[in-house]
Amino acid sequence: MTLTRRTFGKSLAALTLATTLSGPALAEETIKIGILHSLSGTMAISETILKDLILWQVEEINAKGGLLGKKIEPIVVDPASNWPLFAEKARDLVERQKVVAVFGCWTSVSRKSVLPVFEELNGLLFYPLEYEGEETSKNIFYGSSVPDNKAIPAVEYLMSKDGGSHTRFILEGTDYVYPRTSNKIIRAFLKSKGVADEDIRENYTPFGFSDWQTEVAAIRKFGSSGKKTAVISTVNGDANVPFYKELSNQGVKATDIPVIAFSVGEEELKGLDTSQLVGHLAAWSYFQSINTTQNKEFIARWRAYKKDPKQVTNDPVESAYILFNLWAQAVKKSGSTDVAAVSKAIVGESVVSPGGNTVTMNANHHVTKPVLIGEVNAKGQFDIVFRSPPIAPKPWSPHLPENANRQ
């Protein structure tokens, strides 16, 4: 066809109309969400599985017709264990990509990096990790535990007869806000129970730390005083692999100096020979080994999605599952993806977790959960040795005097 000025104008108009229909108009037919987890760097060992969990949930809900008659469109970004990059990626998701909610972050430093972005832009972050507390935000919903409903009951267990009657403690952490703040709370609790300063050792190492020989030797020395000693570990990410290997190399057994970890679960154990770590502990609100029909069905569906009969689950996976489904329920309830509408609707909503607990979102944006303590077994799983009833969260720790008038 020969283009005249008139036919060119008609063609241009048609092209403009087609572009408009295939761009913003089609974009309005989906509900965009962001997935903000490290898929590279030191935290990829822990965070990649959470990206997969959200994609699985999106696939399942889209197969049922989506939400509000629209399919959910996940936008995955990789902040690469780089804390300032988390903030940049969060801003891009909310401001440019126009996502209605973001599911992401693992470390507290990543969450602290993005918090002002979500508050400035009035976005929503659903955060699936237990953390140090001392924070609330109208733009964040927290899906796991704080020290008062995880760390403190775990330390009480270590001090109890069933937990070994320990009176001497090593606070071993990665050098950032979660370990340091958690240990400030734990130290205050221990001192309130009569534990002397000389019976508490505190040490921090960088992200990705691998040269554990000297520190594990120091742990052995501190534990040789004749008092029953335990390690409370807030070591995060891939530094756990050489840490546990060095414990094994130096013969630090759970019968001598048990380690209770707050950031090691089934996913992190995959890279370890757990036959040398039997009896060491972890504290979470969920373990894959929970022996219920509901949990077995959850694991089977997860493995079918991953096409891997050995794929593990863990506590952050359960928390991410809970948060996604609470968000979806709030969208349905409110009939909207609007931040204010969803934030109002989600408070009081409940989800039955894979572990069998009814988990409710409280007005303080935190959830009520039990504490479970598991012992590492030779199969890379945890045998549950302690289970608390569900404990209401207190984001502002009552063990810190500065929180006396805070809720």
Image: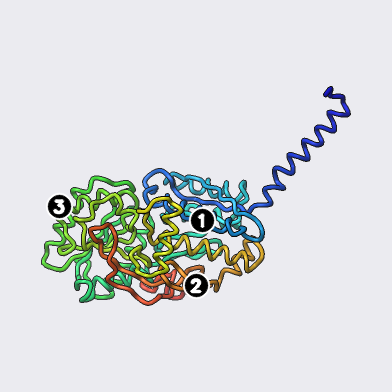
Near-viewer residue (54 or 79): 54
Q: Is residue 92 left or right of residue 291?
A: right
**What amino acid is labelled 1 in the image?**
Phe
Residue count near mark 2 (Cα–Cα under 10 Å), binned few <14, some 14–19, many ≥20: many
Tell me which residue sits at (21%, 60%) in the image.
Answer: 278
Alpha carbon distance from label 1 to label 3: 40 Å
Q: Position of residue 404 (x, y in %)?
A: 42, 75
Q: Position of residue 63 (x, y in %)?
A: 57, 56
Q: Which mark is residue 103?
A: 1
Of tags 2 and 3, which is closer to the observer? Answer: 2
Alpha carbon distance from label 2 to label 3: 44 Å
Q: Is residue 222 left or right of residue 346?
A: left
Q: Secondary structure at mark 3?
A: loop
Residue position for label 3: 250
Tell me which residue sits at (29%, 52%) in the image.
Answer: 240
Residue position for label 2: 360
Residue count near mark 3 (Cα–Cα under 10 Å), binned few <14, some 14–19, many ≥20: few
Q: Which mark is residue 393?
A: none
Near-viewer residue (227 or 71): 71
Q: Secondary structure at mark 2?
A: strand
Would residue 198 be visible to someone looking at this image?
A: no
